[in-house]
Image: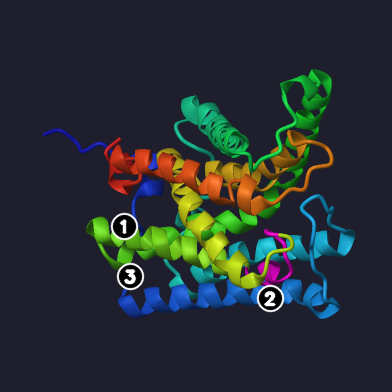
Amino acid sequence: MTRPTPPTPSTRLTQPTPTRPGAVRRRGLLVYLVLAYAGMWAAMAPLLADGYRRSNAREETGALEQLCIAAAMLAPALAALLVVRFVERGGAVREALALRMPRPRARAVRALLLPLGIIGGLTAATLGLGALVGDYPFAGFGALDVGRVGSWAVQGLIGMVFSLPLFFGEEIGWQGFLFPRLLQFGGGTAGLVRAYLLTGTAFALWHLPTLLMGGQYPGRPWYLAVPALTVSCVLVLPVFTWLRLRSGSVVPAVLAHAFASSMSVSMVREFAAPDAELDPLTMSLAGWPGWIVLGGFVAFLAGTGRLRPGRYLRR
């Protein structure tokens, strides 16, 4: 009699967590969202009280702003850890939140480099589309100095590496905790789509305090910024989720998020005319050109079955 092959570490990570009583699962989700959102509002309270508002996309953030942002980014991870430990009480925290390096190790390097290439390529396509229609003030290839661009890239990547703990703070919550648990509330295509939409929307609305201060869309009113970021998050979340599912680890999603929030934003400034006004709503992944590019890539992922967790369970 042939002994069954034990599941690989990657398979264990991508499988849904064991079914729990509905009341416990719902309570865990509610507690997570309350803690994550409360942490964001508490972290941003000093800036809101001070009347801080960002009005220019080229404006650098000060020390207080950076401190508040760092505290806010850690809130989803803290919320997820507390729920897994004290509400779910259902196993090891690392397993429950996919906190391990991609497996098998032979493919780990590719799994870690892929997010940088994917988000970098999507950003380049977005800027190209914006320049083609005249919304992005591209400086022109003649204005690009190889040494300057190389220095920018190295410095940007180093800064991204140092900021990774903060992006772990976000993705442990959204990709490690929320998305896989929402999958438990319904099977089939409808349940899968619902999990993507709810996670993306929760991810976007969590940013409400920063949107009120012009964080993502400087100079834009909140009633335009909120729906704009919701569209952006709903479209980019499947890309992060795909990277998380195919690797069985939350780490590639962390890298993708870090690149999108740092290097991708910096690319908009780096390749634009020096004195041009920058508007994220018309020239970034968080604007309409990015929605088109992200929408096309997500359609490709969905059409090829890459957004279905079951595809990776069979490996």
Check if mark 1's residue and mark 3's residue have beta carbons within 8 Å: no
Instruction: Name the residue tied to disc 3.
Output: 20
- Which structural element holds mark 2? helix
Q: Position of residue 48 (x, y in %)?
A: 78, 76
Query: Residue, x 46% and y 57% (percent of image)?
Result: 96
Q: Which residues are magenta?
A: 208-217
Circle 1 or circle 3, nearest the eye? 1
Kindly identify the amino acid type of the residue bearing the numbered disc 1: Leu
Query: Which element type, helix, strand or loop, lies under badge 3?
Result: loop
Residue 62 position, x and y percent, is 88, 59
Rendered residue at 58%/46% (across/down): 285
* Amino acid tagged 2: Trp
Query: Which-is-in-front pick, marks 2 and 3?
Result: 2
Q: CA distance from mark 1 to mark 3?
A: 19 Å
Picture disc at residue 192: 1
Q: Secondary structure at mark 1?
A: helix
Give the distance between the C-alpha atoms of the residues marked 2 and 3, in whole angstroms: 30 Å
Circle 2 packing at 10 Å, graded few (<14), some (14-19), many (20+), is many
Residue 93 in view (yes/no): no
Q: Which residue is mark 2?
A: 41
42 vs 86, nearest the viewer:
42
Q: Residue furthest right?
A: 63
Going from N to C along the chain, the mark reached first, 2 or 1, is: 2
**Residues marked 2 and 1 touching at CB (< 8 Å):** no
Q: Percent x, y for residue 67?
A: 81, 62
* Number of other residues with Cα within 10 Å of mark 3, as a class: few under 14, some 14 to 19, many 20 or more: few
Where the N terminus falls, by quadrant?
top left
